Amino acid sequence: AQSVTQLGSHVSVSEGALVLLRCNYSSSVPPYLFWYVQYPNQGLQLLLKYTSAATLVKGINGFEAEFKKSETSFHLTKPSAHMSDAAEYFCAAPKRGGGADGLTFGKGTHLIIQP
Amino acid sequence: KAGVTQTPRYLIKTRGQQVTLSCSPISGHRSVSWYQQTPGQGLQFLFEYFSETQRNKGNFPGRFSGRQFSNSRSEMNVSTLELGDSALYLCASSPRDGRETQYFGPGTRLLVL
């Protein structure tokens, strides 16, 4: 079964600095990969989605992610952090290759923006 | 289009009681999935419904159940509540199945005392 690992439960960057949040998937190439963001006391909002059409995926709020099969990675980046980016970020993939049995999520990375 | 809505937003119950949570998906979406989010276990898949049928279920005890109505609205029920059931319960909808992009509601925060 597919699993997703996010390295670093907390990441702290200065405002204006590069944001890099790491995500690795475990098994065969999944049909989709997602990054979601969760602000306090809210649900999850989709940032971007990989569908195999392109390895570099652009999302909302200036975020992008690159799919690298050789590294089984799908890291999320943003060139310049804003204070409003402070939130919890989750990487996710379909649980199995076939069958509609939901998404499996990483443990999440809490992004802290230092002024 | 209106987003996914969940009611109630907050709920306090005591051990042994039961609770029903409601979710209205985005109009036209036929798949509804439920997730439990806790600080210790993170986000865990509960179950997914499509056309009033449960298609998949996560690794949760039988106390957790759900259903979907003909208008795609869904409810989940937890019977004989335990302290460990305190969590944020998230509902998500997608057009066809749970492997696609899921759109999440704001969640229902359940506190069991």
Image (tube, grey):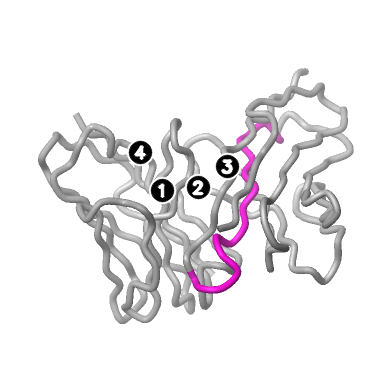
Do pointers 4 and 3 mark residues of a single chain? Answer: no
Q: Which amino acid does label 1 sit on?
A: Gly
Q: Residue A43 carries which label?
A: 2
Chain of residue at mark 4:
B
Give the image location of residue A8, x and y in percent: 68, 29
- Quarter of the figure with residue B76: bottom left
Q: Name the residue under label 3.
A: A38
Give the image location of residue A107, x and y in percent: 57, 38
Query: Disc 1 to disc 2, how far (Cα)?
Result: 6 Å
- Residue at image location 65% in from the left, 42% down from the top: A5
Query: Disc 4 to disc 3, how far (Cα)?
Result: 15 Å
- Quarter of the figure with residue A56: bottom right
Chain of residue at mark 1:
B
Q: What residue type is labelled 2?
A: Gly
Marks 1 & 2, CB-CB < 8 Å contact: yes
Residue numbers of the magenta segment? A85-100
Marks 2 & 4, CB-CB < 8 Å contact: no
> Dot 1: few (<14), some (14–19), or many (≥20) neighbours within 10 Å?
many
Do pointers 3 and 1 mark residues of a single chain? Answer: no
Marks 3 & 2, CB-CB < 8 Å contact: yes
Query: Disc 3 to disc 1, how far (Cα)?
Result: 11 Å
Secondary structure category for the residue under label 1: loop
Q: Which mark is residue B87?
A: 4
- Residue at image location 63% in from the left, 48% down from the top: A4
Q: Mark 1 points at which residue?
A: B107
**Residue situated furthest left in the rendering:** B16
- Where A79 falls versus A59 (above or below)? above
